[in-house]
Each structure stands twice: as structure tokens, then as C-alpha cells.
């Protein structure tokens, strides 16, 4: 699975940026968009799995135990949630 990171998202911005202030503004803009996409576009289960595995750094086994589902189900929810976020963020940025 390819992780969705700010570095990857910055590569999607069309114009190269030289100034640190511009990079900081871009990161802030990406963070706001990502937060909004997370809140509004993911299912509750996807949010839980993405939060535990991506944001908190728990393994799929730990997240599965916390949520009462299998590690495989956690992986599927994380992948679908990250794919959805990636598609929407690419659309918003390009």
C-alpha cells in the first residue's frame, strides 16, 4: 500500500515553489483539505481504521483487536479510505 503523505501530495501541486513561506502555505492548505476529506468523505469504519493505523501508528492486529474486526478487514478499510482520500485530494489539487 502506498502511504499518503504530505511529501507525495506536494508533488501533485502544479507550480514548483522556491520560497519556504510558499511551501508552508501549501502544507497548511493540504492539511486543511485532507482533514475535510477525512471528516466528510470516509465511512465511519474507514475513519476508525485510518485513524488507528495511519495517524496513531498501530498495527492492523492492534487496530483489529480494538475495533473487534480481523486484521485483514482493517487493511481493506485503510486501503479503501486512503485510496478515496488520494483520489479526492488529487482532484482538488490539480
Image (tube, rainbow, N blue to C red):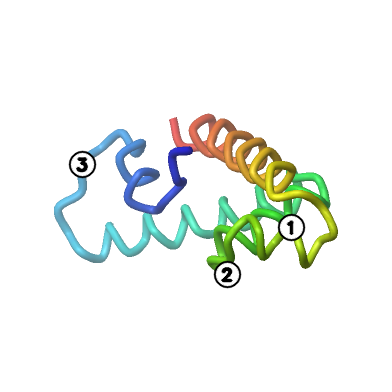
Q: Assess whether mark 3 and mark 2 are in contact (beta carbons under 8 angstroms).
A: no
Taking the spot 69% from the left edge, 62% from the top edge, the residue there is 63
Taking the spot 20% from the left edge, 41% from the top edge, the residue there is 16
Q: Assess whether mark 1 and mark 3 are in contact (beta carbons under 8 angstroms).
A: no
75 or 21, nearer to the observer: 75
Work out how far the residue at label 3 is from the one at label 1, CA to CA, in angstroms: 41 Å
Q: Which mark is residue 16?
A: 3
Q: Which residue is mark 1?
A: 64
| Residue 20 quadrant | bottom left
| Residue 27 quadrant | bottom left
Q: Nearer the viewer, mark 2 or mark 3?
A: 2
Mark 1, other Cα within 10 Å: few <14 / some 14–19 / many ≥20 = many
94 or 82, nearer to the observer: 82
Between discs 2 and 1, the one toward the N terminus = 2
Work out how far the residue at label 2 is from the one at label 3, CA to CA, in angstroms: 31 Å
Tell me the element at label 1.
helix
Mark 3, other Cα within 10 Å: few <14 / some 14–19 / many ≥20 = few
Amino acid at each position: 500500500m502506498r502511504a499518503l503523505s504530505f511529501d507525495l501530495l506536494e508533488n501533485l501541486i502544479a507550480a514548483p515553489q522556491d520560497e519556504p513561506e510558499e511551501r508552508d502555505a501549501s502544507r497548511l492548505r493540504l492539511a486543511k483539505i485532507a482533514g475535510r476529506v477525512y471528516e466528510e468523505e470516509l465511512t465511519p469504519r474507514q475513519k476508525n481504521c485510518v485513524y488507528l493505523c495511519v495517524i496513531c501508528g498501530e498495527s492492523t492486529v492492534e487496530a483489529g483487536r480494538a475495533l473487534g474486526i480481523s486484521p485483514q478487514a482493517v487493511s481493506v478499510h485503510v486501503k479503501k479510505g486512503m485510496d478515496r482520500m488520494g483520489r479526492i485530494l488529487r482532484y482538488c489539487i490539480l
